[in-house]
Image (tube, rainbow, N blue to C red):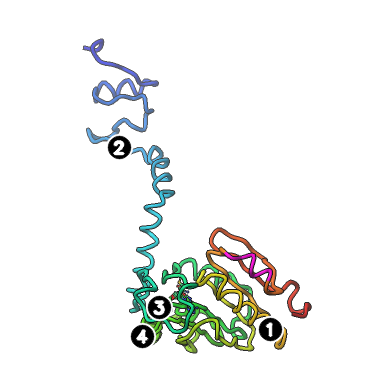
Amino acid sequence: MLNSRRITGRTNEDFVRQLKHPKVQTDAGPEAIPRHSGRRRVDVRRLSRPLARLRRSPILRALVGEARCWLFDCRHGVRTCGTVDLNKLTIKGDNARHGVFYHPSHPKFLFEIMGALDIDYERYAFVDLGSGKGRALLVASEFPFREVRGVEFARELHEMACDNIQRYRSASQKSKNVRSIHGDAIDFEFPTLPLVLFLANPFGPGVLVPVLRRLQASLASHPRDTIILYAAPFHSDLLERETRLTCVERSVYHNTYRAPHYPATPY
Ligand SMILES: C[S@@+](CC[C@H](N)C(=O)[O-])C[C@H]1O[C@@H](n2cnc3c(N)ncnc32)[C@H](O)[C@@H]1O
């Protein structure tokens, strides 16, 4: 009986389809109506908004990030994942109280910031102060840096970094000159090569200030291009106060510092 059915379609076609499939309401438009069988078709356009919301969800993003880290380790036969508290580790020197716990940077982020450098990699040293299990060193070795150095004051993390450097498998690796150094960053002598310095918020001002002063002294005695990639830049004011580098890029996760107009400007 026609009258007992709720006919809500907008076109003749809707009308005919609803007669064939009376349970289906057509308010959603003709796409929701089955064309070939009794099975309901999925309107992908209706899913786009919930999917976009899901993609923005912090939980999902964190899970995807963790999955990427885990895949990096699996693909390259290394172990760089996991966070580690400093009080579970054997620390060299007296600066544990200034140090930040081990929490590795995401591989995608590392590839992006290193890949965006507009430099002749072969001339540059890459240095990660507070290098942990060495993930940033491994990613840096995918670029043709002259040398790649990490400084880590926790013995257990340094040993894992050495192990990871040995184990790392990658057909695309460009630099084999990769080393983890066991020591406090406060004592590190910077190489006199042009420099890319990576700081993933490894320590507070108690160590950062002396490190920056040492860097500035090194640049004054051996003028050279230097780029600082400072991730989670909580103490960015100190970089501009203690060195003659200026911030050339601010992004969500990191700041980039460099001498203005290099190489014309003396340090
Ligand atoms: C947030 S993690 C960063 C790890 C690594 N750079 C990365 O991005 O994957 C900070 C690291 O700095 C190390 N660290 C903190 N203070 C240090 C110091 N004074 N000298 C050397 N390493 C230090 C910690 O042990 C920890 O491994």
Mark 4 / mark 3, whichever is N-terminal: 3
| Residue 72 magenta | no
Choose mark 4 or mark 2, whichever is in front. Answer: 4
Q: Is residue 150 left or right of residue 245?
A: left
The answer to whether any part of residue 169 appears in the image is no
Where does the magenta region start and end? Answer: 235-241
Mark 4 / mark 2, whichever is N-terminal: 2
Cα separation between marks 3 and 1: 29 Å
Cα separation between marks 4 and 3: 9 Å
Q: Nearer the viewer, residue 267 or 119?
A: 267
The label on residue 263 is none
Q: Residues within 10 Å of mark 4 (few under 14, many from 20)?
A: some
Give, as a three-letter code, the residue at label 3.
Lys
Which residue in the protein does label 3 denote? 133
* Ligand 1 within 8 Å, label 1 CB: no
Which residue in the protein does label 1 denote? 217
Callout 4 touching callout 3 (CB < 8 Å): no
Q: Is residue 38 above or below residue 192?
A: above
Which residue in the protein does label 4 denote? 163
Cα separation between marks 3 and 2: 50 Å
Give, as a three-letter code, the residue at label 1.
Ala
Choose mark 3 or mark 1, whichever is in front. Answer: 1
**Secondary element type, mark 3:** loop
Which residue in the protein does label 2 denote? 41
